[in-house]
């Protein structure tokens, strides 16, 4: 087994430049079910931070990541804690509607807000470390994928699978 999560299949990959930047991204096909587990949401955060981790590991540079990526990561992490009760600070509460109004009106205590902020920061930091470890363990595979993608401009799912089987594994340990 290559470690590819069938619940998050790859879309055909292509190198998509961001504002005159040679770095690109891989899109994942949307999930079909509407219910997301904590593990699935943590995977989203991890994947969202993989680009930043890759820049540091491969380029030894800390560049400003896309604001949209960070907003999405932050929203997923806050949603886990404040909307879905997946944290320790408010495990049986949902602040979904109130969270969208949080900036204009403080509807929960400063202590609870601080606890939620700390949990969100912890989630993001842990998933950044997880992404970094996965990238470090798969450097050879990532270099080969990057080279082939650069040379061919796109890769099919089958081509990616062959490279993973040859240069993998992508399994977490």
Image (cartoon, rainbow, N blue to C red):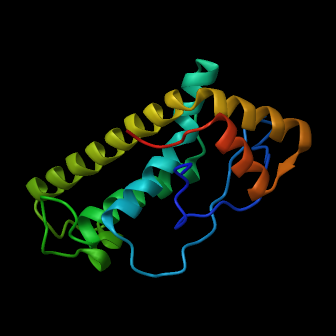
Q: Residue at x 20, y 70 (%)?
A: 85
Q: Image check: 63 left or right of 89?
A: right
107 and 73: which is toward the camera: 73
Q: Position of residue 132 (x, y in %)?
A: 46, 32
Q: Position of residue 124 (x, y in %)?
A: 36, 45
Q: Position of residue 92 (x, y in %)?
A: 12, 74
Q: Image check: 144 left or right of 57?
A: right
Specify the quadrant that holds the C terminus.
top left
Q: Image check: 20 left or right of 107?
A: right
Query: Is 96 drawn above or below residue 55 in the view shown?
Result: below
Asked whether residue 13 is in view, the answer is: no
Residue 122, quarter of picture: top left
Asked whether residue 28 is in view, the answer is: yes
Residue 56, quarter of picture: top right
Q: Residue at x 68, y 47 (%)?
A: 25
Of all residues, the one furthest to the top in this rendering is: 60
């Amino acid at each position: 087994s290559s470690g590819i999560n069938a619940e998050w299949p790859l879309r055909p990959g292509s190198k998509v430049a961001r504002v005159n930047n040679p770095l690109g991204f891989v899109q994942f096909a949307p999930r079909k079910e509407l219910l997301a587990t904590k593990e699935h949401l943590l995977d989203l955060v991890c994947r969202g931070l993989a680009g930043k981790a890759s820049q540091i590991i491969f380029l030894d540079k800390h560049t400003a990541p896309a604001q949209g990526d960070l907003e999405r990561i932050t929203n997923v992490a806050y949603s886990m804690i404040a909307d879905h009760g997946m944290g320790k600070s408010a495990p049986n509460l949902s602040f979904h509607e109130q969270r969208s109004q949080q900036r204009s009106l403080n509807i929960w205590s400063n202590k609870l807000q601080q606890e939620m902020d700390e949990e969100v920061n912890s989630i993001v930091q842990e998933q950044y470390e997880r992404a970094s470890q996965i990238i470090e363990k798969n450097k050879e595979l990532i270099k080969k994928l990057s080279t082939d993608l650069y040379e061919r401009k796109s890769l099919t799912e089958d081509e990616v699978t062959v490279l993973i089987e040859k240069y993998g594994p992508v399994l977490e340990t």
